[in-house]
Image (cartoon, rainbow, N blue to C red):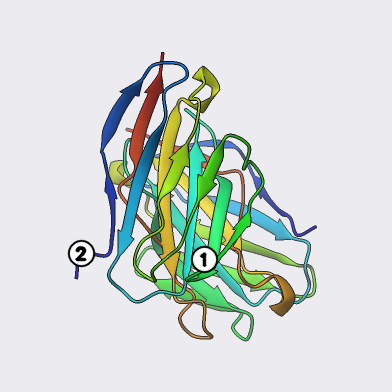
Amino acid sequence: GENVEQHPSTLSVQEGDSAVIKCTYSDSASNYFPWYKQELGKRPQLIIDIRSNVGEKKDQRIAVTLNKTAKHFSLHITETQPEDSAVYFCAAIPGYSSASKIIFGSGTRLSIRP
Amino acid sequence: NAGVTQTPKFRILKIGQSMTLQCTQDMNHNYMYWYRQDPGMGLKLIYYSVGAGITDKGEVPNGYNVSRSTTEDFPLRLELAAPSQTSVYFCASRQGTSGEETQYFGPGTRLLVL
């Protein structure tokens, strides 16, 4: 079945440094790739997304890149700040026949060291 | 526009009791979902619905039931509560059409079964 793998499971970076989280997907027909941030005790919230006809998208300090050939996509956070500490989930919507469900990765716990 | 709302916020159940977790969305979304999230873990899909009158199992449906009589409401029923059902339950919804893929989560219901 459809699968999204996410790495690393935990990541600790110095404040001000960059953080990169990587995901791979199995369904080559997948066409939408959102990233969610979940702060402690809160709900997951969308922070950025990318569609399959775009290779890169940026929003201030965060960016997402997509490599359709390799079936992987990544989240980049630059100039990390304490408020970036959270769990991040990547996700993908599979091809049309399975488009009713978003497939989530297992999550990355990002910690920002002061 | 309240988005996705869930009640109750927190509940303690005794083993063998039953309860219904309520979920309502006011965005006229077709797709609705129930996830559970155990401490420090990812999101597991329990049940989902692609429209009123249509429901389907996710990856962990045992011990739960759902119904979708209206577009707005998607209650989750727990019968014979067990300690293994101690978790945080998130309801979510999305439109499901091209260009409207964003999935929105409710604030969650924290359930403790003792």
Which amino acid type is shown beneath numbered disc 2?
Ala
Badge 2 and badge 1 both on one subunit:
no
Front in this rendered view, residue B91 or A30: B91
Q: Chain of mark 1?
A: A
Residue labelled with disc 1: A34
Residue at the (78%, 62%) spot, across then down = A26
Element under label 2?
A: loop
Location of the N terminus of chain A by quadrant is bottom right
Residue at the (48%, 50%) spot, across then down = B34
Calculate the distance from the C-alpha at mark 2 to the C-alpha at mark 1: 22 Å
Q: For residue B84, what is the image quadrant?
A: top right
Q: Position of residue A66 (x, y in %)?
A: 64, 71
Which amino acid type is shown beneath numbered disc 1?
Pro
Q: Chain of mark 2?
A: B
Element under label 1?
A: strand
Say if residue A105 shows up in the picture.
Answer: yes
Q: Position of residue B114 (x, y in %)?
A: 41, 13
